[in-house]
Image (cartoon, rainbow, N blue to C red):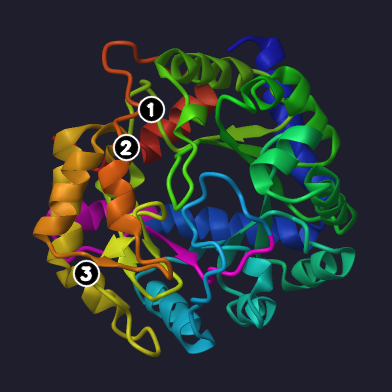
Amino acid sequence: MTLGEYTANLKAALRVPRECSPRLVWKFMYNFGWRSMRNISRFEKRQAKGKPFFPAFVMISITEHCNLACSGCWVSGGGKKSLSVEQLNGIIENCKRKGSYFFGILGGEPLMYKGLTEIMEKHSDCYFQLFTNGILLTEEVAMRLKKAGNVTPLISIEGLEEESDIRRGKQDVFKRTLAGVRACRKAKLIFGVAASICKSNYSELVSRKYIERIAGEGAHYLWYYIYRPVGADPNTANALDKEDVRSFRRFVVEQRKDAPLFIIETYWDDKGNALCPGATGMSHHISPSGAVEFCPPIQMARDFINEDGSNLVELFENSEFLADFRKMTAASSRGCILLEDPQKLVEFLEKHRAIDTTSRQTVLEEYRKMAPLVGHNLPGEEIPEANRIYKLVKKKYFFGFGAYG
């Protein structure tokens, strides 16, 4: 790492204490930073000693309700399913029993869920990453999140003006989302911007110009995903090809040297080997129907929480379905089985008599129609991290936890 790169990284890191409320910075450091490090250590020890399984982190999709209609989204359009407040509270309480205090809150659009801010305020010892399209993130809502102090909004931007409207099925989406970004900045929140990278938005969003624009709007981190064309109306032509994935990985590694914000992805370890968070057991997902799922895009399960979520620990510890799923995916590829081998996935789901967890009830048929696509696994062409800070973090927390042998 050169002196210039070190200086740029330090400058990006210092933006958080300089730009954000001190109380929020403390909550982030303790609720997320300290507690997450301890939690991952506990998880690693459980895995190493063969103790009953419980994931390090739980992602929770609280509702199918959404105010947009995005192309390739796995959430059921017009779906009505939502977790009850009792179930959501139960999930959080049971995770805390196992030492897990960090949660990803997804939808649909989670800000359409009544009582969400009250639940996050109630669990003041936790830290929540709120995945939102930002349209409902008004200044009033942002100030409420500031009051809670334990929430980092992650605002999804799927393209600039024209592409946002095409991808998201509504008008003026980019402008309305930017209003949410600016509300977060005004409230001095720690917040990020997310992007699901596909062919139609690649040139707009995978660029230094975009990184600098988002940093200029006040975002402290940029979270990149790879587009997964699933759901009732997938657009497979928009999926990345192998050269796109290689180029994307090279771009991320290069930009991490001196970007004005943190660039995050959860696809590769420090050596550039692909990883699947579900296969490693690092995280699993709970759907709006209460299903305990392998990951958000794979909407079939065998295990469901009860009316108050009190059986969650028992489900994770005893689920043969999830245990077999982790083994099968780890043995198949270090990448994404949904993209790379959908027919093997179908065979596994049929064998285990998995249940469709959505309102639309067409998921298995959708998977049967899928043809293999390129995932993020690049065997023989791995691109290792170049930034020492990212390399150290990845080496500590993204090494597979023994999933791949």
Residue ID at (12%, 61%): 352
Residue 52, how many percent across, how many down? 17, 66
Which residues are drawn in magenta?
40-67
Report the front residue among 360 and 68. 360
Q: Is residue 253 magenta?
A: no
Q: Which of the two labelled residues, at mark 1 and mark 2, occupies the earlier sequence position?
A: 2
Q: Is residue 182 visible?
A: yes
Q: Is residue 66 magenta?
A: yes
Q: Which residue is mark 2?
A: 336
The three-letter amino acid code for the residue at tag 1 is His
Residue ID at (87%, 52%): 179
Residue 53, how many percent across, how many down? 21, 63
Q: Which residue is mark 1?
A: 376
44 vs 260, left or right, is: left
Q: Are marks 1 and 2 in contact (CB under 8 Å)?
A: yes
Q: Which of the two labelled residues, at mark 1 and mark 3, occupies the earlier sequence position?
A: 3
The C terminus sits in image quarter: top left
Q: Which of the two labelled residues, at mark 3 and mark 2, occupies the earlier sequence position?
A: 3
Q: Could you say whether the residue bearing mark 3 is in a helix, strand or loop?
A: loop
Cα–Cα gap, marks 3 and 2: 20 Å
Q: Which residue is mark 3?
A: 302
Report the front residue among 28 and 112. 112
The three-letter amino acid code for the residue at tag 2 is Cys
